[in-house]
Structures are given as structure tokens and as C-alpha cells.
Image (cartoon, rainbow, N blue to C red):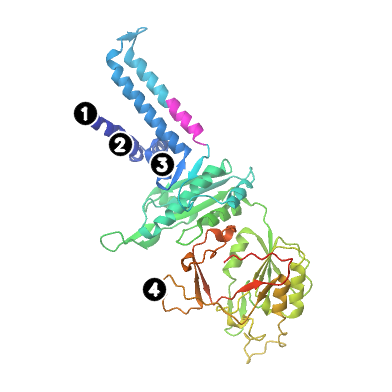
């Protein structure tokens, strides 16, 4: 009977589709045991645009077992009553159970192979080569355990963030092997998972408006991840929109694994990246966020240019060298010419602090009515400094552009430059450089520009 066959087929399919719900009635341990047999976990990769070998193997195995059962039941009318004194039905039942156990075992062993293919157009879930290299450098004796507490249903504005987070966690788990173990908890308010997140890692839900509901409502969203390695622990309480998911995950893994850190030097000058005391306001101000982020991955040291620099560094950050007097500027350039990798930050109009603009006189930030010691030294020749680097920079020119892809910001001045492929420039972002190849849009506030200098020994590669 076709109708009965359809109903029986739906019942069999429902078992695998709702096995998570069935396991929930049998206890948490039983639910965890039955979860790998369900469709949800294996189909999740395909829904995110990732073709996984374990997922393909699961569905092929499930199809093969069900076809075997169909053939077995169809041939039932031809079974003999007994075989060697035992009923034939018991014989086939034992054979079926053995086959199911063998298939589950085979899937469990072969499915551990990290064969996954990201077929999304923008490679949303593909890990960078640097990430794979950093994870491979984790010591074998310091495995990292990652617990993610993520809401199964989130408001529309957090859907992409959730998909990216889950996708990257799955990818890290697939390549981490014994070095990284990932456990993702579907977490809802007032559940045991929510209690564990709060008590163990201080991960709390964030309130977010849910525009998808018929009436305005507030949803409790979990999107926190905890990293542990022995006694070391790092917690990201909430992955908000715009947070670089892959970067934050790898940074936290390296922090708890205590892999060897490189040494980064940051030049101390009037830019005050390490924070300090504001004499005009009479208050202290914190370090720049870039310094806090660097400290999470590197050993960060202060570098003074009052004397020749002799520190051994893996990298050197030079913010606003235009604020330096000529002697200190020469010390910095002499150190750069030793070959240390250096990032020089220049800005013709730093809107966060106009006092350090290259066109300002030295000491522009000083309060003339306060006694702050001897007058500052004259600024050095920033144009000569930049020419020694192999580039030309006019400190008095600011870039402007009429391109603005956002109608809501139509009244912004043209000196706030939107950089994106929509301005019909095929070289908007350098596709050959990993740091810019994946960019889609940048916003620059009153930017300047540099050109290649006259030195033939300098290789000049524009990025934006």
C-alpha cells in the first residue's frame, strides 16, 4: 500500500530528524550520545555552504542502511521458517543490528578526517593560511579546549555573525586534531547551559531587539566563547557584529596555549599610544586600543628615540614620526635601516588630536597658562624622513572624493573618503596582498596620500 509506505517512511525519517528532541526526554547524557545520529548536525555544514566528508558519508550510509532494510523486508516472503534450528527473523535481526553498529563505527572513525570544502562564493568559512600555521604551532602538551555558548535562534541582525562564528569553530575543530577541541552548546535562557556559562565563565546573554516578531520584543542572545588550557583561561563574553571572528578566535587560542610571543616595539612620542596625563584637562587617558590588542598576542615594549635604538625586536610601530625632533627622527630611521620590519603611521590631519598634526608647531597641545617645563624642541624634517623611506608625502594635501555609496551619509564632507569597488576603480584594493584582498569597503577621515620616491632600490606596492 503506497499510503502506508509513505507513512512508515515519514516515521523513519522523523526519527533521525527529531532525535535531538527524543534524546532530551531521556536525559542530557543520552541526548549527547544520540546527537551524532541525527540529521541536524550533519546537515548544518551543507546549510552553511560547506561540503564535509563526514556529512556526505552520513547521508550515504543512512541511505545504504535503509535500502538494505527495504530489500530485506521485500524478500521476507521468501525466507525459510528456520535456519540451523533458529528462526530466520532472529537471524536477520542480528545481521541488521551488526550492520548498523558497523556503519556507525565506520562513520565515527572515517568521519574524523578533516576533509571539508567551502563552496560559498566569498569563502566565508575558509581559514587563512596564517591561521592554519598558527594552530599547527600549538604545543602537543598544551591542548586547548573551546566551549561556545550560542543561541540556536538569534534576531535577524545577528544571523550572519552566528553563522560565521559556528562555521569558523567547526573549521578550527576539523584542523585542530588533538591540539584543539571544540564543543558548541545550544544555549537558551534558564537552561543548564546558560547556568554553566554564567557560573563558570561569566558569559551573560545580551539583549537585542528582534524585528522579525509581529510586535517589538527583546531577545536574550548568547554568543560567548571560553578558551581553556590547563590553568589558563580566556573568555570572549559576546561576539558582537563587526568583530573579526577568525582573528579573535585564533588570538584567544594562542593566548591560552602560551605559544612563543614575538616582541613588538612601539615608539613613545606625542601620539601617546600608551596613554598618559592630559595637562590641559587635568585627567589621565587610557592607552589606545591598538596597544591593548597587540599586548594580547605579542610582548609589547616602549621604545624611546632619545638615544640610538639598540633593542632587539621582531616588529616596530612608529606612530606620527612628524612629532619628533630631528635627532630622534634620525635615531628612528637608523634603526629602521637595520632591517627590522616597521609600520610607520602618518596622517596629515589626525582628527582625534589636531595638536600632533605635522603642520602644527611643536607643543601645540600645551596650555600656555601652565608651567610645563622647558619649551619643546623643533620638529624634524618629516619630508626628508619619508624620502629616506623611498616615498614622497605632501603634509599639506588631503584627499577628497565624490564617491559615496551610502545615501544616509550624503551630507558628509567629501574629505571623508569611501573606498570601495563601486567607484569603478579596478585597483581599489590590492588583490595580491593578503591584508587587502578580502576588503570590501574602507572609510578614511581626511586622508593624505603618498607616491613612490626617486630611489630605484625601493619596491613600492600600493595597497589601497
Q: CA distance from mark 1 to mark 3?
A: 31 Å
Q: CA distance from mark 2 to mark 4?
A: 48 Å
Label 3: which residue? 41
- Do callouts 1 and 4 mark residues in contact (Cβ within 8 Å)? no
Looking at the rendered structure, the secondary structure element under dot 1 is helix
Q: Which residues are magenta?
A: 101-112
Q: Earlier in the sequence, mark 1 or mark 4?
A: 1
Q: Earlier in the sequence, mark 1 or mark 2?
A: 1
- Name the residue nearer the viewer: 111 or 452: 452
**Which circle marks residue 2 in the picture?**
1
Position of residue 340 measured from the top left corner of the image (x, y, whole percent): 73, 63
Relative to residue 304, is residue 134 depicted above or below? above
**Which circle marks residue 14 in the picture?**
2
**Which circle marks residue 225 in the picture?**
none
Label 4: which residue? 408
Q: Earlier in the sequence, mark 2 or mark 4?
A: 2
Q: Main secondary structure of the magenta part?
A: helix
Amino acid at each position: 500500500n503506497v499510503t502506508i509506505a509513505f507513512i512508515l517512511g515519514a516515521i523513519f525519517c522523523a526519527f533521525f530528524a527529531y532525535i535531538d528532541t527524543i534524546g532530551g526526554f531521556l536525559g542530557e547524557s543520552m541526548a549527547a550520545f544520540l546527537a551524532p545520529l541525527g540529521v541536524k548536525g550533519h546537515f548544518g555544514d551543507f546549510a552553511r555552504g560547506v561540503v564535509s566528508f563526514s556529512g556526505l558519508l552520513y547521508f550515504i550510509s543512512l541511505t545504504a542502511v535503509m535500502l538494505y532494510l527495504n530489500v530485506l523486508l521485500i524478500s521476507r516472503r521468501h525466507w525459510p521458517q528456520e535456519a540451523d534450528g533458529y528462526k530466520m527473523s532472529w537471524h536477520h535481526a542480528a545481521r541488521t543490528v551488526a550492520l548498523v553498529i558497523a556503519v556507525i563505527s565506520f562513520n565515527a572513525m572515517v568521519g574524523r578526517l578533516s576533509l571539508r570544502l567551502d563552496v560559498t562564493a566569498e569563502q566565508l568559512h575558509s581559514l587563512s593560511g596564517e591561521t592554519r600555521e598558527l594552530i599547527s604551532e600549538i604545543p602537543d602538551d598544551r591542548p586547548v579546549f573551546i566551549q561556545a555558548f550560542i543561541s540556536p535562534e538569534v534576531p535577524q541582525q545577528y544571523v550572519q555573525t552566528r553563522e560565521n562564528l559556528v562555521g569558523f569553530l567547526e573549521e578550527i575543530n576539523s584542523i585542530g586534531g588533538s591540539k584543539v577541541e571544540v564543543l558548541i552548546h545550544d544555549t537558551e535562557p534558564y537552561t543548564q547551559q546558560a547556568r554553566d556559562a554564567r557560573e563558570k565563565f561569566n558569559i551573560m546573554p545580551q539583549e537585542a531587539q528582534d524585528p522579525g516578531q509581529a510586535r517589538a520584543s527583546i531577545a536574550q542572545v548568547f554568543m560567548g566563547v571560553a578558551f581553556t588550557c590547563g590553568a589558563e583561561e580566556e573568555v570572549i563574553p559576546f561576539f558582537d557584529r563587526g568583530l573579526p571572528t577568525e582573528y579573535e578566535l585564533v588570538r584567544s587560542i594562542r593566548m591560552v596555549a602560551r605559544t612563543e610571543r614575538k616582541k613588538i616595539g612601539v615608539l613613545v612620542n606625542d601620539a601617546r599610544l600608551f596613554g598618559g596625563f592630559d595637562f590641559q584637562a587635568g585627567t589621565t587617558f587610557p592607552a589606545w586600543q591598538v596597544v591593548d590588542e597587540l599586548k594580547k598576542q605579542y610582548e609589547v615594549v616602549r621604545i624611546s628615540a632619545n638615544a640610538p635604538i639598540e633593542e632587539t625586536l621582531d616588529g616596530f610601530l612608529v606612530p606620527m614620526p612628524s612629532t619628533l625632533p630631528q635627532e630622534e627622527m634620525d635615531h628612528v630611521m637608523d634603526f629602521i635601516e637595520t632591517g627590522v620590519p616597521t609600520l610607520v603611521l602618518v596622517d596629515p590631519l589626525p582628527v582625534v588630536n589636531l595638536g600632533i598634526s605635522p603642520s602644527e608647531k611643536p607643543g601645540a597641545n600645551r596650555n600656555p597658562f601652565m608651567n610645563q617645563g622647558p619649551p619643546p624642541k623643533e620638529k624634524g624634517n618629516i619630508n626628508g624622513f619619508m624620502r629616506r623611506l623611498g616615498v614622497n608625502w605632501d603634509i599639506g594635501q588631503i584627499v577628497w572624493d565624490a564617491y559615496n555609496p551610502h545615501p544616509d551619509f550624503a551630507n558628509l564632507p567629501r574629505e571623508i573618503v569611501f573606498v570601495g569597488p563601486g567607484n569603478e576603480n579596478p585597483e581599489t584594493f590590492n588583490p595580491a596582498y593578503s591584508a587587502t584582498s578580502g576588503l570590501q569597503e574602507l572609510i578614511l577621515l581626511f586622508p593624505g596620500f603618498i607616491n613612490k620616491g626617486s630611489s630605484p632600490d625601493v619596491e613600492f606596492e600600493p595597497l589601497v
